[in-house]
Image: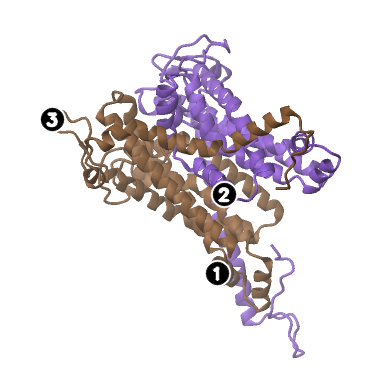
């Protein structure tokens, strides 16, 4: 942090000897200093290594099957061969429907927490609920989805039930990042607007939200990436092992039907189906990881763009 | 945030919108209660009528499909969950805290941004992909390195869980370290302390609550993780004897068996009761972490 201003205590000597000779203590300090820095740097690298290793390994194994057709043909021969069209489209359906539900609720919840709520015990409980909602295990969300949407609401196992389950699960992602974005808008912006006679909602709509839109967008994008990768919550609420749909038809699924999903498809072909053509599970994994990481990269780009453009 | 804004000229549409905003605001509370309610509703019948709770928690015999004598003991599963989490934390905490210290204390701003982006990407990898890596790459590695007959073991699951929870630990621990005022560091350095002494004697004690919260939240994530442990730990009910034994966790049991049980049967209800147990465990851990974090702010 401030390593440029740090000086070696042993390097300046007042006894008229060589001013820049290191004393033994100084040398030892410098060595521990460097040793400690390298030690912690290596620890940091240990987290980057797996990321590169995994992506490299998957790419290497998946290379023979990766092609344009892989994405646009249905799985064949009891999922032993073929492509990813049905699961890929299913994941897109699940993500879009869950986004349509969780984005408005999440953004408005963050508006409430940041713009309306005062610092009371009730607000603290709401914040605690958001944290706890984020901490609920994904399989418990699945049980909730079965109990509430599939059975109680009578939706049956359907895209709608699975998407609602995903929406509730990913809500904290949107709330947290929107809250942060709203909080970054300076108070003076709001005060200026109020002084012109604007109501609170007018201020939020015309000043606060336009000034934090990139941050809100980041949260929405992260929700997409999270929802696309989840497996457990959709396993029992709407995703199925296999379902044939028309290739190339983007409206092939009905919201009240079940669908395939990339994440569940990866689970199925790697654990339940014997003799899958080599490379196909790895190809599925790389498509899943690739889409999720691309979406995340988009969020990062939006965030960096926001920071360079910010005028306050 | 500010005083009330209730003039006579607030239009009706605004009142409606504010009502909607307030409703969304409390949605998180509604959902948390909803989750507990609906999971509880499905399992309540057997929980209060027939289930021997003592046996449920202490017996290692999980035979839900036995024809003559069905037994629902989750002790082995609970032990599986906690042992795989403990081993994962043993692996993740040193690296997580070390990385957090490096990012917060030694990095230039630019390098810090790069590391944070990489950590974010690591956190984004879906759990089913971790499970797949455990099933293929790590499985072979463990067979080769430890000469084990099969690589789908507790160690395999722990490594996957460690990689999944490290990003949480790093980001929260880094926040905690950053919250330590710079004057602490300056005072220590002015007394001639080396960087290591500053970290060890000043920063770690000053940030210990935040670091504890980081570890707790990482553990909560590991306890609740499903797909990775389902695919990587061998999935056999077993009292774990060491890192190379097969285990099965609470989460994996629900995921593996819920699809095969008849709705409303005892076995089905027991799976929901396990859900309540999991919900309670993670709720308590999250609550403790929250209180610990609140503790720093007041101090």
Residue A119 x/y as whole percent: 63, 51
**Residue for badge 1:** B200
Please name whichever residue, A246 or B203, is drawn nearer the observer in this view of the structure: B203
Which image quarter is the N terminus of chain A in? bottom right
Q: How many marks?
A: 3
Q: In the rendered image, which residue does mark 3 sit on? A: B68
Please state which of the two labelled residues, at mark 2 or mark 1, is closer to the viewer. 2
Q: Nearer the viewer, residue A29 or B292?
A: B292
* Chain on which label 1 sits: B
Q: Relative to the observer, which residue lies in front, A288 or B217? A: B217
Q: CA distance from mark 2 to mark 1?
A: 34 Å
Residue A112 circle label: none
Q: Colour of chain B?
A: brown
> SS of the residue at dot 2?
helix
Q: Residue A6: horizontal and vertical position, in percent? A: 71, 71
Asked if residue B33 lies left or right of residue A115, the reply is left
Residue B227 visible at all = no
Query: Which mark is nearer the camera, 3 or 1?
Result: 3
| Mark 3–mark 2 CB contact (< 8 Å) | no
| Residue located 42% across and 55% down the image | B90
Mark 2 = which residue?
A124
Locate residue B253, reporting x and y percent. 32, 36
């Amino acid at each position: 942090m401030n390593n440029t201003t740090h000086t070696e205590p042993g390097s300046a000597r007042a006894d008229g000897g060589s001013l820049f000779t290191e004393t033994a203590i100084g040398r030892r300090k410098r060595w521990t200093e460097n040793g400690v820095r390298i030690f912690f740097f290596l620890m940091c690298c240990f987290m980057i290594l797996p990321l590169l290793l995994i992506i490299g390994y998957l790419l290497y194994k998946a290379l023979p099957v990766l092609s344009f057709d892989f994405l646009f043909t249905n799985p064949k021969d009891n999922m032993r061969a073929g492509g990813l069209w049905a699961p890929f489209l299913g994941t897109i359906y699940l993500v879009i429907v869950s986004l349509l539900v969780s984005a408005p609720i999440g953004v408005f919840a963050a508006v409430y927490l940041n713009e309306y709520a005062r610092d009371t015990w009730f607000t603290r409980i709401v914040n605690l609920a958001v944290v706890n909602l984020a901490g609920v295990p994904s399989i418990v969300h699945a049980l909730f989805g079965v109990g509430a949407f599939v059975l109680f609401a009578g939706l049956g196992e359907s895209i709608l039930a699975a998407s609602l389950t995903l929406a509730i699960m990913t809500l904290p992602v949107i709330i947290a990042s929107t809250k942060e974005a709203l909080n970054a808008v300076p108070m003076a912006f709001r005060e200026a607007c109020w002084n012109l006679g604007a109501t609170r909602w007018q201020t939020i709509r015309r000043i606060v939200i336009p000034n934090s839109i990139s941050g809100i967008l980041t949260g929405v994008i992260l929700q997409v990436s999270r929802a696309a990768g989840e497996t457990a919550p959709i396993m029992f609420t709407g995703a199925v092992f296999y379902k044939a749909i028309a290739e190339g038809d983007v409206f092939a699924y009905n919201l009240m039907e079940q669908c395939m999903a990339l994440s569940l498809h990866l689970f199925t072909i790697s654990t339940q189906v014997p003799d899958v053509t080599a490379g196909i599970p790895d190809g599925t994994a790389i498509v899943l990881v690739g889409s999720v990481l691309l979406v995340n990269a988009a969020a990062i780009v939006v965030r960096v763009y926001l920071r360079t453009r910010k005028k306050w | 945030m500010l005083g009330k804004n209730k003039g006579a000229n607030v239009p009706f549409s605004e009142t409606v919108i504010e009502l909607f905003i307030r409703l969304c605001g409390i949605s998180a509370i509604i959902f948390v209660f909803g989750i507990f309610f609906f999971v509880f509703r499905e399992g309540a019948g057997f929980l209060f009528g027939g289930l021997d709770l003592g046996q449920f928690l202490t017996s290692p015999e999980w035979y839900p499909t036995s024809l003559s004598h069905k037994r629902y003991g989750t002790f082995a599963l609970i032990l599986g969950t906690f042992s795989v989490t403990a081993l994962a934390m043993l692996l993740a905490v040193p690296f997580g805290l070390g990385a957090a210290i490096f990012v917060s204390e030694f990095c230039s701003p630019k390098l810090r941004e790069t590391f944070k982006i990489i950590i974010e990407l690591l956190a984004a990898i879906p759990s089913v992909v971790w499970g797949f890596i455990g099933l293929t790459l790590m499985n072979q590695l463990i067979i080769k390195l430890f000469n084990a007959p099969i690589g789908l073991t507790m160690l395999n699951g722990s490594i996957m869980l460690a990689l999944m929870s490290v990003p949480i630990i790093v980001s929260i621990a880094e926040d905690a370290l950053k919250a330590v005022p710079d004057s602490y560091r300056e005072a220590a350095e002015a007394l001639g302390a080396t960087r290591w002494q500053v970290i060890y004697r000043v920063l770690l004690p000053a940030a210990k609550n935040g670091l504890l919260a980081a570890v707790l939240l990482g553990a909560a994530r590991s306890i609740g993780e499903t797909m990775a442990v389902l695919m990587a730990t061998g999935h056999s009910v077993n009292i774990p004897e060491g890192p190379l034994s097969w285990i099965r966790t609470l989460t994996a049991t629900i995921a593996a068996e819920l699809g095969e049980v008849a709705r409303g049967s005892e076995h089905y209800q027991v799976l929901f009761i396990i859900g309540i147990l999991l919900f309670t465990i993670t709720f308590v851990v999250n609550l403790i972490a929250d209180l610990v974090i609140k503790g720093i702010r007041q101090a």
